[in-house]
Amino acid sequence: MNHFFDWFFEQYRDVPPLYVSLEIIGIIFGLLSVFFSKKRNILVYPTGIISTMIFVYLLWINQLFGDMLINAYYTIMSVYGWVLWTKSSTDTIHVNISKTTRRDWLISSALAIFSWLFVTGVYWFKPYINNGFVWNDTLQVGFQYFSWLDWADIFTTSIFLVGMWLMAERKIENWICWIIGDIISVPLYYYKGLIFSSFQYFVFTIIAVLAYIEWKKTYHKQQQASVE
């Protein structure tokens, strides 16, 4: 067991204590946010906002620009979802849920395509961004310079964007997006050296599976109650 902890914390040997502390705080609020979401509790949003704002900063430092942008998007969508969930609930804490319609899937597809194109553009100009937004002839841009890590980040950004929108709209299928994105994020963050975050996404995967099952049961209860 000691060998495991030695290996685990070795990954953070050269990381400033401030960054490690911020990552842990962001993870704690992120886990709280997912827990509240599973319970359909509106506290999902204030806790989520704290987590995403921290990770915007950390992801910029680690050059995961796609995930950085999606966390900035999360912050904006959390405000939108907070307002939407408040208006949709009589007790302002718990909300009713529904299934994704054809219109919802069309909007989701449009969001995914937009995200894919936008984040691909960000990674195209990644050398320019890393150079302090200063262009020179030595910078190499193009798809041939994309790594598998870049493509994985682009994909997860797209699927998380759709998942966040579906969650704000209280759609059961939002959890399918989270499950897929979380599974991919486990090795993605591990490879980048964000070990705590990698473990966080492992926990997120488990919670998302349980939440999907719970939301489906809740939806069926709502349907039965509306018929009676």
Image (tube, helix red, strand yellow):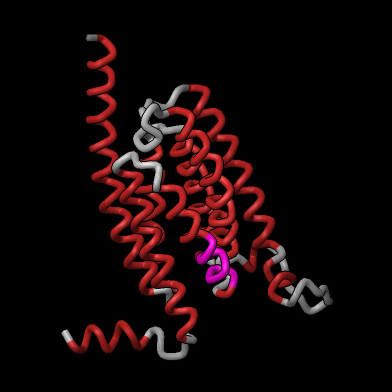
Quadrant of the image containing the N terminus: bottom left
Dominant SS in magenta: helix
Which one is in front, 118 or 219? 219
Quadrant of the image containing the C terminus: top left
Magenta stretch contains residue 97: no
Q: How many marks?
A: 0
Residue in the picture at 81% in, 74% down: 134
Q: Judge whether 39 appears above or below 107 on screen.
A: below
> Can residue 39 be seen by looking at this rendering?
yes
Which residue sits furthest top? 228
Q: Judge whether 47 appears above or below 17 on screen.
A: above
Q: Position of residue 104 (x, y in %)?
A: 50, 27
Magenta stretch contains residue 58: yes
Q: Judge whether 219 appears above or below 20 on screen.
A: above
* Quadrant of res 147: bottom right
Q: Position of residue 124 (x, y in %)?
A: 69, 62
Q: Position of residue 69 (x, y in %)?
A: 60, 57
Which one is in front, 139 or 14? 14
**What range is drawn magenta here?**
53-60
Q: Position of residue 37 (x, y in %)?
A: 35, 45
State left or right for residue 147 relative to residue 206.
right
